[in-house]
Amino acid sequence: MTARDRALIEEAARRLRPLLKAAKRIALCTHINPDGDGIGSEICLLHHLVALGIETRIINTEPLPLRYRFLDPEGAVEVFDANRHEAFLKTADLVIMLDNSSPARLGPLEAAVRGSSATTVCIDHHNLIDPFWKVNIIDEEACATGELVFQIVKALGGAVNRLAAQAAYVSLVTDTGYFRFSKTSPRCHEAAAEMLALGVEPPRVYQEVYERNSPAQVRLGGVAMAGLELLEEGRLGCITLTRAQLAACRAEQEDTSEIINELLSIDGVKAAVLFKELDGNRVKLSFRSKGAIDVNHLASGFGGGGHKNAAGAVIEGSLEEVTRRVLGPFREIVRRPA
Ligand SMILES: [Mn+2]
């Protein structure tokens, strides 16, 4: 870590220390549709807070996806239920939000968190700061929120055990696409090296996280690729998935993020978009890009967001209409020389 990174972590620890010292009950949460980074961050931090003797609950909006269940052998992650969790959230001393700063992305948890008297803390690596959180610990240069959590726990003097390191490692590998996206940095690899020294086994993690595709998911990948279109002289890859195709593959609930990532493996492709038809006349847009092409900006224009090279949005309209609306501006930015 550079002096700048070190200072940021120390400052985070300095702000958190008195809050943790005074806290008896803490709720941890992440965004809706929790991903490897949100979940890994929660579990890494949970181990530390439990070791401090603090009653800590992870309250998410959805159950853990199958691929992340190995991180939680004792079933600590709870799914939000107003009857079971409102009282805890209301009276918790701290609510710590991980990997997201937007209260709206708390989904069904939002009202309960807004109604809490807890001190609210946000730890994140997206470049947004929401005034809702009393304490904001944001480092855009971190490759994953889990990287921040791992460093903060160490700066707090916590002993990171194998399970906590494994959870943070999952944050790293899922948010960097196994150390290949642009935020993969020396400090990210340094953190990974430390995690391995703490007992994390990369082959085990890879199998758990990436070799749990369902047949439906792999079949859907085939259907998607068969319909691939290349625009802008092969610079822009474009895939559309209709509800009928999803149903035919029995893949309505399947994650499609790997399908779009694969488009970037085509020689010459600089950017990609996946249009996925949802129910209720809505379409999910997923954007990917390489280098200077900023899809975050594009996604923001459609009410979504993400990172410079990976972003998304959900918008209303028919597949045809949405495709037209989105491809115009997308082709424009792909055409413009970087
Ligand atoms: Mn993240």
Image: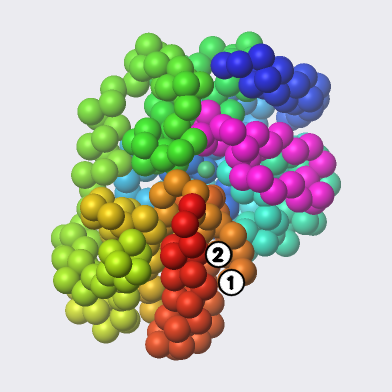
Do the numbered discs 2 and 1 sit on residues whose CB atoms are within 8 Å?
Answer: yes
Q: Position of residue 167 (x, y in %)?
A: 43, 31
- Residue 11 picture quarter: top right
**Which residue does the image show at 61% across and 16% down from the upper left?**
2
- Find numbered disc 2 in the image and state the secondary structure of the residue it sits on: helix
Q: CA distance from mark 2 to mark 1?
A: 5 Å
Identity, as a three-letter code, of the amino acid under mark 1: Phe
Q: Nearer the viewer, residue 248 or 140?
A: 140
Is the residue 52 above or below the residue 109 in the image?
A: above
Per the rendered image, the range of residues in magenta is: 123-147
Residue 320 in the figure: left or right of residue 62: left
Mark 2 burial class by Cα count in 10 Å: few <14, some 14-19, many 20+: many
Identity, as a three-letter code, of the amino acid under mark 2: Ala
Is the residue 40 above or below the residue 271 in the image?
A: above
Q: Position of residue 305 (x, y in %)?
A: 58, 59
Residue 299's disc is 2
Q: Is mark 1 within 8 Å of ligand 1?
A: no
**Residue 148 visible in the current orientation:** yes
**Which residue does the image show at 66% across and 45% down from the upper left?**
127
Q: What color scheme is it?
A: rainbow
The reply to whether the magenta stretch includes residue 138 is yes
